[in-house]
């Protein structure tokens, strides 16, 4: 089966089928057994955190649950770490890609910033709300009315209750309690990074080439304060050192400066190095140490000497540290998008302390994950790949194994860090994992492919694949363990590796470096897609020699993805995301000849959205899956059986759960129905196969 090329991955909406369809589905397909009960989740992405004076922790991001309780991207943890059940602002987020931030205000209120479209069912300005203090928070509409409209996401608060931000007119300030502007105060501003309050009557801001200090009393620049900073690296945050005349500033390149509040000069002996490039966030603990975090993890530095005292790498699907917040007791909360910090499994939120060698998990902050690839082992076990950090409450890193009865193999737990685009099972039951892989089982990967033991999940260390690419998009393994692969910027559209991983130099056709994706065998041919002029066109190669068939040409308008299955008479069913085939109007699904010149058949089921999976059984039955809600003239919920002769949707087999990819076996069809998980339905009505809707 061909997989969607990641560069061209599109956001395709999937609508639910009508209620009558569900009723019809239950009449045609028996209720499946309730296994595997494996909700797939990823670490919820937390973009900002802030402590309140009472020790409660505020969170905002794109997460969907906290400690198993639904939350719509905003939540409050009580000082004991439990979720505040009464603090659940009725926020609805808009579609704009705007960073979300949360601030604790001096009057006990909370400022939530981001792409908020509605609050408690009422339309909002679209940039944020101020919430009242206490349980059951309500919006304070007058705050934004007094502020005169949308206040930027990045703001800075001082000790006197003012909120500062950069506006088109310059540096402005408003009252944290009322939102009222100070009409008599306008600071000079050339900032494109964060504003930092230095605790001594000044705001530090950044221009392209230097740092400036703005005097809060007048809004004028402090002419006695000069510092070049780090040109070309954005100021991401900072904090004052209360007991001295210094302020810490942190930059995106990972550097941390300690500057004099009076002059802007660096502290004597302070080191000039970047412990964590790609930094996003900074905090100073009450004990004096400073923390900087980013896509690599978090490090703790001495506030006195600047030396690195400890560091904790992160793992996860997107791997980023977005926010650090200092707690009154000297500990620091770390939040972002990660499933492991140091040696500690944690879902997006952890606590760092000077006394503990490793972080402590604070809460389970999660979002829905999903399965995207399926492969079946010879013993009937199912390998599931996708984007998930937990499965059924158990730690799993993007790969798991289901036993033939549908239960999860608790002993099979390889760790895959990165993006998996291809999955295949060898004749020995070994698992080949391809994609843009950062590491597998803790070892870095640079060639996009690893082989795992099918029984234990351990890496097969003596298999070293000569892939000639950093990213593998398609895999096919033949009966003698020769691997065929497609990838990014490869010399050959399909590269064949011998059983030991070495390239088979006698097989294949060399081209200019190109990107090929998908890989499926039909008879003695391999079908792939090759990038050409920005589009991906289906091509055919000989399985025996690797030579391209120059006479078999299929051109598709708006082509994105491809899946191919053979018809009983030798034709080919092609699914994907396209509008025409060789100039003939066809939407997302077509039937073409395997002979040349290619003929587009008078066969047109016309699904209303993309088709990711196409499969045929040994007795000629045809199944399709994807994002469609209509196909073959009838409503269907993302999958359907079609008549091979005319493409009509058949009422004799209707599955009630939608899907993206599919895998046909002898007696059943598996669906990877992201974000629901894995579902299996019998091909013969009357049988019962394991499944779970994972809702």
Image: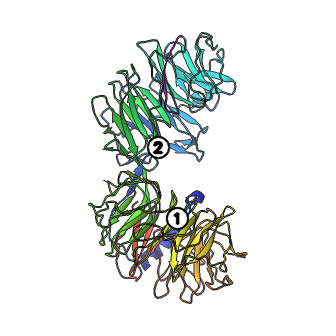
Q: Nearer the viewer, residue 225 or 305?
A: 305
Residue at mark 1: 16
Answer with the quarter of the image where residue 168 lies: top right
Q: Is residue 143 left or right of residue 88?
A: right
1 or 2: tag closer to the N-terminus: 1
Q: Farthest residue to the front: give it.
A: 506
Mark identifier at residue 73: 2
Quarter of the figure with the C terminus? bottom left
Extreme residue in the right direction: 583
Q: Position of residue 21 (x, y in %)?
A: 50, 73
Asked if the stretch drawn in magenta spans residue 456, the answer is no
Name the image quarter holding residue 429. Answer: bottom left
Q: Is residue 447 left or right of residue 57?
A: right
Say which of 147 and 95 sits in front: 95
* Image position of 247 with respect to 355: above or below: above
Secondary structure category for the residue under label 1:
loop
Asked if residue 666 can be seen in this view, the reply is yes
Residue at (49, 35) in percent of width and height: 279
Q: Which residues are magenta?
A: 249-262
Task: From the top left corner, tell me how far across and down residue 505 is, in percent.
Answer: 51, 71
């Amino acid at each position: 089966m061909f997989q969607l090329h990641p560069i061209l991955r599109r956001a395709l909406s999937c609508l639910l089928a009508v209620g009558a369809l569900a009723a019809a589905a239950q009449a045609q397909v028996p209720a499946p057994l309730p296994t595997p009960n494996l909700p797939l989740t990823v670490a919820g992405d937390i973009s900002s955190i802030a402590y309140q004076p009472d020790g409660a922790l505020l969170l905002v991001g794109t997460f969907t649950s906290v400690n198993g309780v639904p939350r719509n991207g905003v939540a409050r943890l009580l000082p004991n770490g439990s979720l505040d059940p009464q603090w659940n602002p009725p926020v609805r987020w808009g579609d704009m890609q705007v960073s979300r931030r949360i601030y604790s205000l001096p009057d006990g209120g909370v400022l939530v910033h981001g792409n908020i479209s509605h609050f408690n069912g009422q339309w909002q300005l679209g940039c944020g709300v101020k919430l009242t203090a206490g349980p059951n928070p309500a919006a304070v509409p007058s705050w934004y009315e007094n502020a005169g409209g949308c206040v930027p996401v990045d703001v800075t608060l001082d000790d006197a209750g003012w909120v500062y931000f950069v506006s088109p007119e310059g540096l402005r300030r408003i009252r944290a309690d009322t939102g009222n502007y100070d009409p008599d105060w306008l600071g000079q501003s050339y900032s494109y990074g964060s504003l930092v309050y230095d605790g001594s009557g000044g705001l530090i801001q950044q221009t392209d080439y230097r740092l400036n200090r703005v005097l809060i009393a007048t809004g004028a620049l402090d002419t006695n304060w000069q510092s070049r900073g780090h040109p070309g690296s954005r100021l991401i945050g900072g904090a004052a050192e209360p007991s001295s005349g210094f302020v810490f500033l942190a930059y995106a390149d990972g550097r941390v400066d300690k500057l004099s509040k009076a002059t802007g000069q660096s502290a004597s002996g302070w080191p000039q190095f970047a412990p964590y490039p790609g930094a996003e966030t900074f905090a100073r603990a009450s004990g004096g140490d400073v923390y900087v975090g980013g896509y690599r993890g978090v490090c703790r530095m001495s506030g006195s000497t600047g030396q690195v005292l400890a560091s904790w790498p992160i793992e996860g699907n997107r791997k980023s540290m977005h926010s650090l917040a200092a707690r009154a007791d000297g500990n620091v909360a770390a939040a972002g998008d990660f499933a492991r910090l140091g040696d500690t499994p944690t879902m997006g939120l952890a606590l760092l302390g000077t006394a503990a060698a490793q972080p402590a998990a604070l809460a389970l902050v999660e979002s829905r994950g999903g399965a995207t690839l399926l492969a079946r082992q010879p013993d009937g076990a199912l390998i599931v790949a996708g984007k998930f950090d937990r499965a059924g409450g158990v730690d799993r890193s993007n790969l798991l194994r289901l036993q033939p009865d549908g239960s999860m193999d608790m002993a099979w737990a390889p760790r895959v860090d990165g993006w998996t685009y291809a999955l295949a099972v060898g004749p020995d039951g070994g698992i080949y994992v391809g994609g843009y892989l950062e590491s597998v089982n803790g070892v870095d990967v640079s060639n996009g492919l690893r082989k795992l033991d099918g029984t234990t999940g351990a890496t097969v260390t003596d298999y070293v694949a000569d892939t000639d690419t950093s990213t593998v998009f398609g895999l096919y393994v033949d009966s003698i363990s020769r691997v065929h692969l497609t990838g990014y910027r490869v010399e050959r559209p399909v590269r064949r590796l011998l059983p030991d991983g070495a390239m088979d130099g006698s097989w294949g056709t060399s081209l200019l470096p190109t990107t090929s994706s998908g890989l499926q065998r039909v008879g003695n041919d391999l079908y792939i897609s090759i990038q050409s002029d920005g589009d991906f066109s289906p091509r055919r190669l000989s399985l025996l020699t690797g030579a391209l068939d120059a006479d078999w040409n299929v051109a598709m308008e708006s082509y994105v993805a491809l899946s191919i299955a053979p018809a009983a008479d030798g034709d080919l069913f092609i699914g994907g995301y396209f509008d025409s085939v060789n100039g003939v109007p066809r939407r997302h699904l077509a039937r073409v000849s395997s002979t040349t010149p290619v003929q587009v058949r008078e066969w047109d089921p016309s699904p209303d959205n993309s088709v990711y999976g196409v499969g045929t059984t040994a007795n000629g039955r045809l199944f399709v899956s994807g994002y469609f809600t209509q196909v073959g003239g009838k409503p269907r919920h993302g999958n359907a059986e079609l008549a091979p002769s005319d493409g009509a949707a058949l009422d004799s087999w209707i599955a009630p759960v939608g899907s993206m990819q599919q895998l046909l076996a002898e007696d059943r069809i598996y669906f990877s129905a992201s974000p629901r998980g894995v579902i299996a339905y019998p091909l013969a009505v009357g049988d019962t196969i394991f499944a779970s809707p994972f809702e």
